[in-house]
Structures are given as structure tokens and as C-alpha cells.
Image (spheres, grey):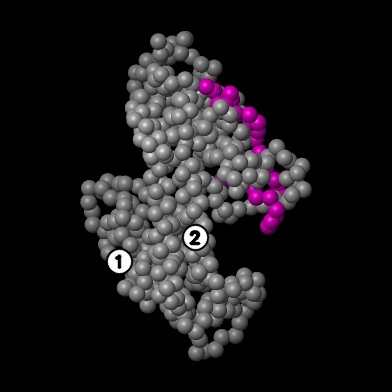
Amino acid sequence: MKGYNVLLNRPSVTWVTKMGLDIRIDADYYSSLYLEKELIEQNNELKYVELGNLGVGFSYGTPPYGHLTNEGVPYLRITNIEDEFFLNDKELAYIDKEYHLKNMRNEVREGDILFRIKGQLGQALVVPKRYSGSHTGSSFLKFTPINIDSYFLILYLSSSFGKNQILRKQSNSIIKYLNIDDIKSIKIPLPSREIQKYIGDKVRRAEELREEARRLIQEVKVILEKDFNLNKEEINEAKFNWVLSTNVEDRIDPNFYQKRYLKLIDKLGNDKEKLSKFANLVTRKYKKRNKSFYIEISNINTTTGLIENASFLNVAEIPTSAKYEVKEGEILVSLVRPTRKAVTIVTREYDNSICTGGFAVLKPKDNVTSEFLLAVLRTDFVTIQFERYCAGSTYPTINKEDVLDIYIPKYTKEEIDKITEIYEKIVKNISLSKELIQQAKQDVEDLIEGKFDMSKLKESAVESG
């Protein structure tokens, strides 16, 4: 017997028998939403094991107050999580080696799992090889998985069923948290090793594709910036400057003419050209339709430069900030805090989507490709110019017309073709990575609901062979 009876779903009203009572008696713990999900897991044929028996070395990190440095041992934080399952170097912090050696229990090794205990509770990821030997702090619980495929484990924790257990076990207080006993008591399904590997391999492959994309992004950066020697100390050395009247543009605020900005423009060479030569602004008003993707600035992955998790909305749900209809191949440039590099390309899946008026929408001219335009707008020398147009403002925002006044150096056709080729690979890798993650997530849901297609394993074996 299930030990309860759901009387109402909204609001949740549940009659719980004495047999159905657990160690907690707060009403939220017995919400109908949690209990119905739990019932599905109770009725499937999978074996379940508590997380505490599938890992060793469970420990909380400690915040390294006063020990952050500009170099040393990488310190992994929530800001380093990218697209749910992966780590990146964005805003990567460091701690001094002496502190790290005194707090070795906070060291993470390849294959360890970081379980998030602040903010998005239960988000979990596997530490890749390149972060082995790093340090973690109080945002994560760290442990080493045993007797389970680590990538299958994090997929389950991110599934609707894993989240159901995590949300049910969280504290019923203003600040939500999980204690270590609650975490260890999460029940994890254990299908065959073959199924675990099949599902986990999709995340492993997705991670490989993203690693390759990161390498290619650096390769593009070398091509774009190799001759400019952007020494930040040199560019930032002076905060005042004399400017000839012939060099004064249509702005007279002093911050706009700081020496560091003018030095940067000089470094771009005599053949530099304004972006207006390569792109036009698009102000195509959106047309209402039954449903459409709505792209916000927060949907831009500032590491990869691609759109992620845009909402698919009904007409009534589209916010008043919606402004433009965008087409495949157009470039979106964030006008708010533009130095974050929230610049993206509209891929095929987002053709005819709607975007917020917080973007400048650019259409490349015939002399360049969309991929080249995306790459060049994400360079450091463009970001510094965006900063220049934000100068003097209390809230960092630029006008869409300012984007076309940005200078870029002259590139040969061969360089443009090379950059285009590389960025096409980057977009393809990231898109395939996202597709594999969605497939793996669906596999876990299907497995628990008894819908998993076992023939996939045979097809996978044939492909591997």
C-alpha cells in the first residue's frame, strides 16, 4: 500500500496514514507532487541504492577567506558551472598553494562529483581531468562515486525524479538547504552497467565536443588578435589625454577620450574599418503568432556565444520587452553590459524567433560571413571599445547605432574563410553537445517510467563495432 491518498492537487491536500509517515511531519514533505513522482519509482522494477552507499569521502568545502590570488591553485565556484553539467574557466579564481596544502580535504580529483548545496540545490557535475587537483569551497558537497557510472548518476540527479527527491528533502525554511544525511539518503536507481554506460557516454561525448569547441575558440582568438599585442597594462596606463580638435567625434565627455581607448584604436592599424562596412542594423518588428521562441540576454552563453534555453511562449506570455523578429544567420549583440560578450548567432532552430529590445540585431553584408562577424564581435579589442561607449554612464549600456561605429582591423579573405570554417565547427560541436544531453536526459526519464528502448543498446554496440 502506498500509505496516502491525494485529495487535491492544487492546493495540495493529502491524507497520510500512519504507515505512510516518514521521519518528517511538515506538510510540504507530503505534497501530492512529490508523492506521485515517488510512487512511479516505487512501482518500477529498478533496484535503488542510497547515495551514501555509492560514494566515499563526502565532505563540505570551506570558503578560502583572505586566500584568493591571481594565480596558484584553481578554485571552483558556482560561476564556473556552464550549461548544467560542465565547468569552464570563466571568472576562474585561484587560491595560494600554502592554503591549499593545509586544506587538502577540499581538493578535487578527476572523476569526483560536486553536488551543489547553494542556490540550485542538487545540481551535480563530474570533475574533468583538466581540473584535477583544483580546490572547491562551501558551495559544493564533494564525494568520489563508487559502483556506479558517474555520468549516469549526475543525469539522474538532474532528472525530474532526482530533483523530486532533492526538493522534497530540502529544509522547510526561508533559506533552503540539504544536510549531508539528507543528501546521502537520496535513492539512486541502479540499472545494468550496460545501460548506465550507454546513457553516461552521451554526456562524456558532449563534454569532449565542448572541450574541442573551447580549443577552437582559442584558435580563432589567436588568428584575430595575433598582431595587436594587447598589453592590458600598457592600454590602461594613462587616465588623461590631450586630444586634437580634428579627432573629436560627436561626443565630448572626457571618459570617451581616455588614452587607453585611443591607444587601442591605434594598435588596430591604419587599415582599420568601422563595423558599418560589414553589417547593417535590422529593426524588423515581430509578428504575433501562436507560439515563438523568445530570446533574452540571459539566454546567451557568454563562453560559447550560443543561445541556450530560450523560452517557447504563447502570444499571451510574450513580455512587453519583446521587440524584434530575427532570422537565421543574424547576429545579436547585447546593449546592456556589453563587455560580458553576450553576442550570439541566430541558428536554424531559432529562425523567426522574437528577441528583446536589449539586443542590436545585425545582418552581415555580402563581404563577410555570420560566423566571422560573431567571432570578431567577441574579441577583446571590440569589448574594450564597447566599454568606451559605456564610459560616463552609471549603468553600462550602449546604443545600437554605437555598435556600427566599432573599429575592426582589415582581414584577408583567407583569414575570414579560416575563421568562418573554425566557427562553423564550434557551432556544430556545441549544438551536437546540447542534443546529446537532451537525449541522455530523456533516456533517464524513460528508464524510470519503464519506456526505455532496449534495442538502443544493440544499435550502439553495432556502431561502436
Q: How many marks?
A: 2
Q: Is residue 337 above or below residue 429?
A: below
Report which quarter residue 30 is drawn in.
Answer: top left
Mark 1 — residue? 283
Indicate which disc residue 335 carries.
Answer: none
Q: Position of residue 137 (x, y in %)?
A: 65, 42
- Residue located 59% across and 45% down the image: 129
Horizontal side of 319 relative to 306 (left or right) equals left
Label 1 CA crowd tier, 10 Å (few <14, some 14–19, many 20+):
some
- Residue located 33% across and 68% down the image: 363
Report whether residue 73 is seen: yes
- Depth check: 425 or 92 in front? 425
Amino acid type assigned to the residue bearing label 2 in the image: Ile
Mark 2 falls on what kind of element?
helix
Looking at the rendered image, the disc whose residue lies closer to the viewer, 2 or 1, is 2
Q: Position of residue 162 (x, y in %)?
A: 46, 30
Q: Is residue 300 above or below residue 22?
A: below
Q: Position of residue 81 (x, y in %)?
A: 53, 46
Horizontal side of 317 relative to 75 (left or right) equals left
Mark 1 falls on what kind of element?
loop
Please say whether residue 56 is one of the residues in the magenta stretch: yes
Sequence order check, earlier mark of 2 and 1: 2
